[in-house]
Amino acid sequence: MTIESTSSWRFFDAHQWREQVLASSAQTAITECSKQIAKSQEQWNLFTDIAPDILQQAAALDELPESERGVLHGVPVVIKDENDVTGFITGYGTKANKTVAESDSLTVARLRAAGAIIIGKTTMPALGAFPFTESDAYGITRNPLNPAYTPGGSSGGSAVAVAGGLVPLALGGDGGGSIRIPADRCGIFGLKPTRNLVSAAPKKHLWFKLGSAGPLARSMRDIALATEVIAGLSPTTLTRYLAQNLADNSDSSKPLANLRVGLVTKPTSPLARLHTEHLSAATAVAAQLRALGAQVVPVKRALPDPTMIFLVQFFAGLRETIAGLEDKAKLEKLHHNTARLGFFAKGKVLRWSLQAAQKYADKLQAKFADFDLLLTPTTAGRPATVGSLQKRGGFFGAVLRAIPSVAYTVPANVSGHAALALPAGIAKDGLPLSVQLIAINGRKKFRALLSGVKLTEVAETVTDSGREREKAQESEVITEAATTAEAEAMLCWVGSHLENYCEL
């Protein structure tokens, strides 16, 4: 294998990074990553902590025999500040905790066991409450595509690390869109896995039934591999399942002929207004799916509104996190009254919400029983400029400003369905567009996707049209799409885990 110049490594996905590590060394690779850390932190402010031992981690990996080198051998990964990492404080985007974690969370331990090098912990808004990565404790995190804009949130620091070329892979968490929204804002891939697929251990849950840890990445195949790792699945599950399902239909000119997709563009929240370019992006992706043989049917109705179910678990999760903080006096002003505002989110009301979430999932599946997937915009509005949480209006003002970001993402958190943010071109403002795919009835019928599916071909086509628009405007914004094989691999994993792990 030819060893690439280390200056080009920052554009690799995790698979390519590992290949280059095997051809050279983990120390060579991580030295290149180290060069980018200080510059990236100065430009975008994405870290809460940086690991002091990354070169030692790399050296230890280089000592391993080939047979013990994992699927993420030498791959640098960053971790959102709500996950325990040995030697670091878990601050939830605040400086209200003091105790250093003595062990990794299960997801981080699995990443390490697969050979990942943990670079550091990334910024999030305090408590992960909003889709803007800003806090009193760590300041404003900026979008690497345009620093005047937010990268979204709450996994904003993780998204910036991937989109900015610092690492190929990041761990986020999604309780209301917190992986998919920053993936949307930064032009990368982000997956909220099916409920209960990824363990929250040592914690009992992430916002009760709403949340899950999940990956952000620059390629679809990295999304698939990372999710296998953090879910504790065999690293051959995806490849084996893919081979089985591609064999029968490899010559099909219409690989999605058995796929039924519902195009839902009406926002769930009546307070959200869909931006015309977001509608155009969803329509363009729908057209490409049709070209591959899928049956795409526009749906006039919105997804059922789960706001009340969501708010109970949202406040209950915030109250629980606040109760566990060691120095509540250091919690930022925006959240001084959050626990009191959520006084109702306990006891019978919380039990109602947990039961209602399952009923909502049943209702959603019944209402959209004719479809295997739902295709929606990922967000309703364009990215906000930085400083959204510093504006007037306090907590409820921030909630109102969050609505355009969460109008399409919250339903999958309440229902527990897997949901993916997929890049879908570039808007006139030079920032990315994105669509969301929700695996609404995937338990068996979703297998139809696995027979020669070319989802990234869709992303390439739509992104290319976005490039043409930007070229006409003399824009220098560049986005990259993954290969067809990567898309097939990711979708293979989605189908596999829905088939084997999802009882919806």
Image (spheres, rainbow, N blue to C red):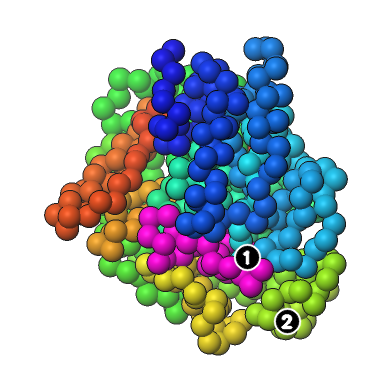
What is the quadrant of residue 455 in the picture?
A: top left
Describe the element under mark 1 as helix, strand or loop: loop
Name the chief secondary structure element in magenta: loop
Circle nearer the N terminus (1, 2) = 1
Residue, disc 2: 336
Question: How busy is the neighbourhood of tag 1: few (under 14 within 10 Å), some, or many (20 plus)?
Answer: some
Q: Whole-Å distance between the Cαs marked 1 and 2?
A: 17 Å
Q: Residue 399 at x, y = what percent?
A: 56, 78
Q: Are marks 1 and 2 in contact (CB under 8 Å)?
A: no
In the displayed structure, would residue 278 be above or below residue 339? above
Residue, disc 1: 138
Instruction: Tell me the kind of residue under disc 1.
Output: Tyr
In the visual, does 475 lie left or right of 417?
Answer: left
Q: Residue 332 at x, y = what percent?
A: 69, 76
In the visual, does 136 lie left or right of 371?
Answer: right
The magenta-colored residue range is 128-155
Of the two numbered discs 1 and 2 in the rendering, the one whose residue sits closer to the viewer = 1
Instruction: Tell me the kind of residue under disc 2.
Output: His
In the displayed structure, would residue 101 be above or below residue 446? below
Q: Closer to the camera, 425 or 470?
A: 470
Question: How busy is the neighbourhood of tag 2: few (under 14 within 10 Å), some, or many (20 plus)?
Answer: some
What is the quadrant of residue 498 in the picture?
A: top right
Describe the element under mark 2 as helix, strand or loop: loop
In the visual, does 138 lie left or right of 3?
Answer: right
